[in-house]
Amino acid sequence: MTKMQVVAKTILTVLGIHAIVALCGNYPGQYLFATQEISVLSEALFFLAFILGVAFVGYFMVFGNNQLSRKMAGTAEQFVPRDQTDWLVKSLRVGLVFAGLMLLPRSVPILIRTAKLFFLIRPAVSDIIVSKTVPDILRLSYAQWYRTIYEFLKAILAIYLLCGAPYFLRWQMRHSSRTEAATKKTEIADPGATN
């Protein structure tokens, strides 16, 4: 990998994370199924198709972006393998922390509500046991449940990214080194294959 390919890989990863979060935040089913009577099977199939679409975007933007970054940045002088690893780790860490900073401001309200929830659990459980009814804090529509779960998962993702996403970085390093080794084998076997 070249320096520009590492930068392109980082940009694609950050944009991919942002695209996944934006797509999940605008899930059309939360509004569509709230206003219409649709069977559970139709709703499940729609949700599955949506998740597959998001997974497709995530795979090519975040996890499988080596080929795309090579095409975007072109060819240049290759790194020494040790320098490539250092550049990739530092570049991805900065990019992931930046992505976490982009997600954090909108995640603060759900973090505050989650902290308040600990004080509401005991009265809610008491209501369930004593009056055998569902407390008001649990009476949410489909769209409200979806939005609450989405916001909570987005807050967890923001915190993980602010920590530098250590497990993702380790996986990315292993994946990139394997892909780079496979590319070099291809170049040795057929020098014109990568051009």
Image (cartoon, rainbow, N blue to C red):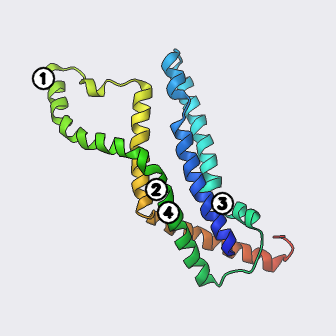
Q: Residues within 10 Å of mark 4 (few under 14, many from 20)?
A: some
Could you tell me which residue is drawn at 29 percent across and 43 percent down?
112
Q: What's the residue type where badge 2 is placed?
A: Gly
In front: label 2 or label 1: 2
Q: Quadrant of residue 61?
A: bottom right
Give the image location of residue 27, x and y in percent.
54, 33
Residue underneath mark 1: 130
Determine whether 80 is above or below 100 in the image. below
**Viewer-side residue, 58 vs 116:** 116
Q: Is residue 38 left or right of residue 147?
A: right
Residue underneath mark 3: 65
Residue underneath mark 2: 100
**Residue positioned most to the top:** 37
Dot 3 or dot 2, earlier in sequence:
3
Dot 1 or dot 3, earlier in sequence:
3
Residue underneath mark 4: 168
